[in-house]
Amino acid sequence: MFHIPYRIRTIGRENLPKDRGYVLCPNHLSAIDPVFVVLARFWGKKMWVMAKEELFHNPIIAWVFRHVGVFPVARGRGDRSVLDGAIESVRAGRGMLIFPEGTRNKEGTGLLPLKSGAFVVAAAADADIVPCRIIYKGGHQHLFCTVTVIFGQPIPIESLGLGGEHPASKLREAKKVLAGRLEELYEQNRRYE
């Protein structure tokens, strides 16, 4: 057992699909964000988390990550085996956490441009995308702060028109939809900042 020096407030846990896999898409402000998201959902089906392979260079962190469902991704290399594994995991009914910004937003305001990976996995697995907003009390992560994790209503993948081929225009539109939902979650819950 261990203690984390943060208070986690969870809103919207009921929005996580219970009967099928999904792709969970939170904003990304801090290296510890995945821990808060996994703890906020706390129970239910196992969740897999993609993380940049550089984090696995430390053998202790790599060991912990492998035992809690985190797997390495070589960013920018288009590793098809990782993508196929993520798709199969979601098809098997698991949740998959993918930060659509692709990296931490060190400015802490707004969103970085969204990457395509979460949409590709969701479309190939025929899974909904669940927007998730992380808000730190005081605007940034620090010891003993309150972290609010908000799970939004799922976005049905068929509503994004991404089945089969992913024309660039449809992908751009899907990114706008998710970015809009993430911003809505922030605006509706900014009192927690």
Image: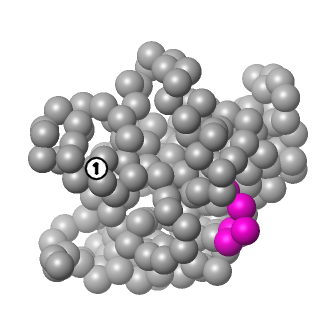
User: Eyeballing the image, is 101 above or below 181?
Assistant: above
Residue at 44% in and 19% down:
76
Q: Is residue 188 left or right of residue 122?
A: left
In the image, is residue 19 part of the stretch drawn in magenta? yes
The quadrant holding residue 55 is: top left
| Of 150 and 4, the residue lying toward us | 4
Residue 152 in view of the camera: yes
Q: Quadrant of the N terminus?
A: bottom left
The answer to whether residue 64 is left or right of residue 171 is left
- The picture places residue 96, in percent across and down from the top left corner, at 54, 51
Q: Position of residue 144 (x, y in %)?
A: 18, 79
Q: Which amino acid, by three-letter code, is at mark 1?
A: Phe
Determine crowd level at label 1: few under 14, some 14-19, many 20+ residues with C-alpha closer than 10 A: some
Residue 125 within the segment the image draws in magenta: no
Between 159 and 71, the one lying in front of the other is 71
The stretch in magenta equals 17-22
Residue 101 percent coordinates (x, y):
49, 41
The residue that disc 1 covers is: 65
